[in-house]
Image: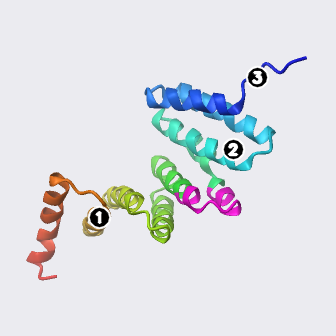
């Protein structure tokens, strides 16, 4: 008797294609199937990666509570398996899910943890991305000065700044110069 279930790698690949094409509900379904298959196969690293992908797809599909449940614990799994880069990414995904669920305090804490990890890894591009998200969250929390400072730090870490980024950076520096800082 043959097993007719597709291999989890093939399912994950199809789910990624669906995600890239903007079919987020289909992608989420595929990543969920892949996650279960990786779990059954005893592959915790691939299972955690599928959980992270599932979380992002669910967020894009407008299902934040499910996204939060999907990503919970994956950073710890990556840490346990010695994959610091994916643990940092998982913390960023956790922060996004927490923010989408309205838990802004926990989201800020998770963004800060992700930023610390990406700093340790010297991943400036990821630092810039996290700082941009953190700045937006600080604005939501009514902290415009913190948001301004965070956005400036994000632009400074961005490895490739285009004309627009350099212009925004100069504009953001203006209040500090006016205050004599």
Q: Are marks 2 and 3 in contact (CB under 8 Å)?
A: no
Q: Secondary structure at mark 2?
A: helix
Looking at the rendered image, the quarter that the N terminus falls into is top right
Q: Residue at image x 57%, y 55%? A: 86
Q: Mark 3, residues whose alpha carbon is within 10 Å: few (<14), some, or many (≥20)?
A: few
Distance between the alpha carbons at the discs numbered 2 and 3: 17 Å
Taking the image as shown, residue 3 lies to the left or right of residue 142, namely right
Distance between the alpha carbons at the discs numbered 1 and 3: 48 Å
Secondary structure mostly seen in the magenta stretch: helix
Dot 2 or dot 3, earlier in sequence: 3
Give the residue number, with chain letter if any, for mark 1. 147
Q: Mark 1, residues whose alpha carbon is within 10 Å: few (<14), some, or many (≥20)?
A: many
Taking the image as shown, residue 46 lies to the left or right of residue 53, namely right
Q: Position of residue 73 (x, y in %)?
A: 66, 55
Give the residue number, with chain letter if any, for mark 2. 47
Q: Position of residue 82 (x, y in %)?
A: 66, 63
Q: Mark 2, residues whose alpha carbon is within 10 Å: few (<14), some, or many (≥20)?
A: many
Give the residue number, with chain letter if any, for mark 3. 5
Between residues 169 and 62, which one lies in front from this camera angle? 169
Dot 1 or dot 2, earlier in sequence: 2
Q: Position of residue 32 (x, y in %)?
A: 65, 34
Q: Is residue 78 magenta?
A: yes
Q: Residue at image x 51%, y 28%? A: 17
Q: Is residue 69 magenta?
A: no
**Which callout, 1 or 3, points to the residue nearer the camera?**
3
Q: Secondary structure at mark 1?
A: helix
Q: Residue at image x 69%, y 38%? A: 35
Looking at the rendered image, the quarter that the C terminus falls into is bottom left
Q: Secondary structure at mark 3?
A: loop
């Amino acid at each position: 008797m043959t097993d007719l279930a597709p291999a989890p790698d093939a399912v994950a690949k199809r789910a990624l294609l669906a995600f890239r094409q903007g079919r987020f509900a289909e992608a989420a379904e595929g990543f969920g199937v892949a996650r279960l298959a990786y779990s059954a196969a005893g592959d915790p690293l691939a299972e955690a990666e599928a959980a992270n992908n599932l979380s992002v797809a669910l967020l894009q599909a407008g299902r934040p509570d499910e996204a939060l449940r999907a990503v919970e614990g994956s950073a710890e799994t990556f840490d346990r398996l010695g994959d610091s880069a994916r643990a940092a990414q998982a913390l960023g995904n956790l922060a996004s899910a927490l923010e989408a669920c309205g838990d802004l305090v926990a989201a800020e804490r998770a963004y800060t943890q992700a930023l610390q990890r990406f700093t340790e890894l010297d991943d400036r591009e990821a630092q810039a991305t996290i700082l941009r998200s953190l700045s937006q969250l600080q604005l939501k929390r009514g902290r415009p000065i913190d948001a301004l400072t965070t956005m400036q730090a994000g632009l400074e870490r961005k490895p490739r700044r285009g004309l627009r980024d350099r212009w925004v950076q100069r504009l953001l520096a203006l209040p500090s110069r006016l205050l004599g800082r």
